[in-house]
Amino acid sequence: MGGGSAGGATAGGATAGGATAGGSAGGSTVDDGGTYGLDARPSNTTCIAPNPPPTTSGVTEVRVFPKLTFSAPLEMLNPPGEPGRIIIGQRAGAIVQFPNDQDAGTASVTSFLDLTTKVKATGEGGLLGIAFHPQWATKKEVYVSYTENGPTGLRSVVSRFKSTDNGATLDVASEEPLFKLDQPYDNHKGGNLAFGPDGFLYIGFGDGGSQNDPHGNGQRVDTLLSKMLRIDVNVPYAQRYAIPPTNPFAGQTICQQGSNDWGGTTPTSRVCAEIYARGFRNPWRWSFDTASGELWVGDVGQGSYEEVDRVVLGGNYGWNTREGKHCLSGSTCNTVGLIDPVAEYDHGQGQSITGGFVYRGTSIPTLVGKFIVGDYQTRRVWAVSFDSQGQGQLTSLYTSAANMGSFGQLLDGEVYVMALIEGRIYKLAPSGVQPPDTFPKKLSTTGCFDATDPKKVLPAMVPYGVNAALWSDGATKDRYFAIPDGTRITVNADGDFDFPNGTVTAKTFWLGGKRIETRLFMKHLNGQWAGYTYEWDDLQTDATLLPSSKSKAVGAQTWFYPSRAQCVTCHNTVSGNTLGLELAQLNGNYTYPNGRTRNQVTTLDALGFFAAAPPTVAAMPDPFGTAGTVQERARAYLHANCSICHRNGAGQGPHDFRYALPLNMANLCNQAPSNGDLGVTGAKLLVPGNPAQSLVSLRMKATNVNRMPPLASTLVHGQATALVDQWINSLTVCP
């Protein structure tokens, strides 16, 4: 059964955001009896998509601290809150420090911690990671990852060290090992570690070495090898660490405590609770984006491909089933549930990736928000960027003078290259003339909002509401669009809108009674769509353009601001670029700022916004209103939240969530999943009468890698899951 026409006349209304939009735009709240929602199409000479900001510029490197050389440096960082002090970790075990002075002299270098008598740096071992406790100001603890001689060969160690002189140095005698992990071979140690934005300690290990992952560690869950781990170290030392409750296997075996402690016999049946994500060959250098909190990894390939991963909770990144996006020779290559790398390169471009950092400095604006990676062998340096469809790609920056064993990042967000062999340090720097950037940096300068009070929209912006809204973690929204004078909107046969060049759409998000974000989605004069996010200040005086993604605590929740590339992940060509601006969504009453409550489609048609009379398209009901059947309301919600990717054979699998399709044509009911069953026996996309086996329901309730929708949402929409479950329970058979 399709969507039907129930609820079309009243589905818009205040619940679609009309009252909010009217209030923010100002004007009367009394209906004056006008025929349409607006008297005339507003003139628009200011709210027109400008030229996009530049995305590339010249990049090079300059040597810094020219009086200093180091022995195989692998770590470079500031202690939290101390930009004036630099810490360098060297592979043989010596951690040194010196003042943050570009011309620092050799006499200023002193020891911070000396582990040279403990560290075994054979093969790919050594001192591999340093992480300061996030509360360093009051908790003088540092966590170190290194390899030592174990009973059967190399052994990875993760230890805590404390300071007895208020952070000036670390006391080697204070070592408290959290765990020790036997390594079967000398290569693929990984070994990096860092605290995440959640305050937990993350640790990355390779598959243990040799070729082709002979022990199958990549896909096993009974070993810590080939994994990204996450543990809670804020517990009494006697406990060593705890398991964060949202870890994928929380409640299972803590694999480095108990009878298997430090190299004992591996149990034949267990699941390691420390695991955060799996399927890595050798995660050689990785980091958290200091603005968005996203975890980026450079994973070293074997014979053909190197890859860049953006790692999420519960993710499986494919080794040893795949190398990059490609089946490993001899593998059965079941790719169900595997996550593709964001980007990869073949061995014609490089042979050993070194992961870096997301650039958050100020000297190279076009790099902000991009993950910097390099190749140890060819010395090429790239930035991970995204094309107009949101697909990851490597943009070549320059060729380094160094065999980059590692990158470093200081508190100012600048990125450094550490030459493993030469022992020198270089800093990424601008090269040549930097391109001008005239794109508006404040919402008040966009020409769409009042320059003196950007809380008010200019008359050129047309407010609108939708019948079924996209879930945005509880935020309410104001919605507007503006098209240039003399242009019209073409309405396609399916009711979707095709906007003219120069169009600007806007959406302001509210949480706790305050604006937190305004997103502008623009169709530039070259015909290409792009999204831009503006973050509102706490005083609500203006909003500032963000160069890329960001996470921010708002009340009791974390709000995620998407990057420009992430905007076009949902606002894609399959969905018609704009979301919500279609006849089925706008066919309903809406309360305009002047107080009139009128049908939006009728109003837009009468005022000359359409190039031709629009076709008749049935309205969607409000999923949480009283009009429409349970099926119609549930499918309206799924249309708004799922069909933006899953339609016309796009997305992963043939299922199609569009509201207008009859259910027997949607490829949902009793259809096998194309991306895994989440471990639920008998799971299908939709099982009549059984939400517990229906992946449509299960994915809406997930908070990890299995979550749908997968972007910019971390909170489960309880009212929506209840509605969809009610619909599934009402079905007895597939149509």
Image (cartoon, grey):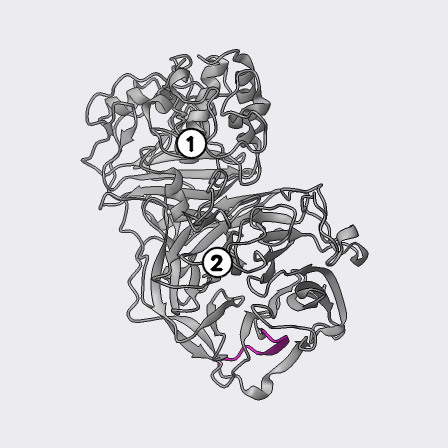
x then y, percent, for residue 289: 51, 56
Q: Which residues are magenta?
A: 91-102
Q: 596 or 493: nearer the eye? A: 493
Q: Amino acid at mark 2?
A: Gly
Q: Residue at x 38, y 57 (%)?
A: 345
Q: Which residue occupies the foreground of this view, 530 or 258?
A: 258
> Which x, y percent locates residue 492?
25, 26
Helix, strand or loop status at disc 1: helix
In the displayed structure image, the side of residue 594 where residue 683 appears, left or right: right
Residue 497: tell me if it is visible: yes
Q: Quadrant of residue 171?
A: bottom right
Q: Is residue 478 magenta?
A: no
Q: Quadrant of the C terminus?
A: top left
Q: Is residue 601 above or below residue 334?
A: above
Amino acid tagged 1: Ala
Tell me if residue 162 comes above or below residue 663 in the rendering.
Answer: below
Please tell me whether residue 98 belongs to the stretch shown in magenta: yes
Give x and y (percent) for residue 274: 66, 49
Number of numbered labels in the structure image: 2
Q: Is residue 538 visible?
A: no
Instruction: Say whether residue 238 is left or right of residue 510.
Output: right
Q: Quadrant of residue 152?
A: bottom right
The residue that label 2 is drawn on is: 298
* Mark identifier at residue 21: 1
* Disc 2 element: strand
